[in-house]
Amino acid sequence: MPVEKEFLEILACPLCRGDLSNFRSKEKEYLKCAKCGKLFPIDDGIPILLPDAALADPER
């Protein structure tokens, strides 16, 4: 389930404070940072914005 636009406007990447957007891979949904490219998983509709949960973007 993607994060609503209004919610994304108040969220920021915990690593670099960049803007976040919805990103979907083949099997999972994430929030993706526009600045550093890290991916943060969304589990049961809840974004996990912990630095330890961040994954590198495989497309970068």
Image: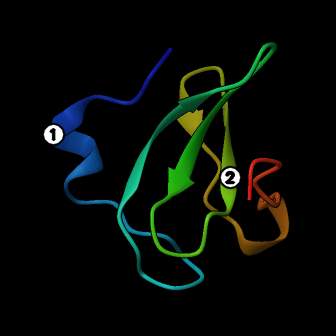
Q: What element does badge 2 sit on?
A: strand
Quarter occupied by residue 18 = bottom left
Name the residue carrying label 2.
Answer: 39
Residue 55: mark? none
Give coordinates of residue 60: x percent, y percent: 74, 59
Q: What element does badge 1 sit on?
A: helix
Which residue of the protein is positioned furthest toward the bottom in this rendering? 16
Crowding at mark 2 (Cα within 10 Å: few <14, some 14-19, many 20+): many
- Looking at the image, is 22 positioned above or below residue 44? below
Which residue of the protein is positioned furthest toward the front in this rendering? 60
Q: How is the image coloured?
A: rainbow
Crowding at mark 1 (Cα within 10 Å: few <14, some 14-19, many 20+): few
- Residue drawn at x 75%, y 48% as measured from the top left: 59
Give coordinates of residue 22: x percent, y percent: 46, 35
| Number of residue marks | 2
- Residue drawn at x 21%, y 35% as measured from the top left: 5
Quarter occupied by residue 56 = bottom right
- The amino acid beneath tag 2 is Leu
Name the residue carrying label 1.
Answer: 6
Q: Nearer the viewer, mark 2 or mark 1?
A: 2
- Looking at the image, is 36 positioned above or below residue 10? below
- Residue drawn at x 22%, y 59% as measured from the top left: 10
Give coordinates of residue 31: x percent, y percent: 54, 44
CA gap between label 2 and label 1 equals: 19 Å
Left or right of residue 55: residue 18: left
- Residue drawn at x 50%, y 14% as measured from the top left: 1
Give coordinates of residue 39: x percent, y percent: 68, 52
Q: Nearer the viewer, residue 33 or 50?
A: 33
- The amino acid beneath tag 1 is Glu
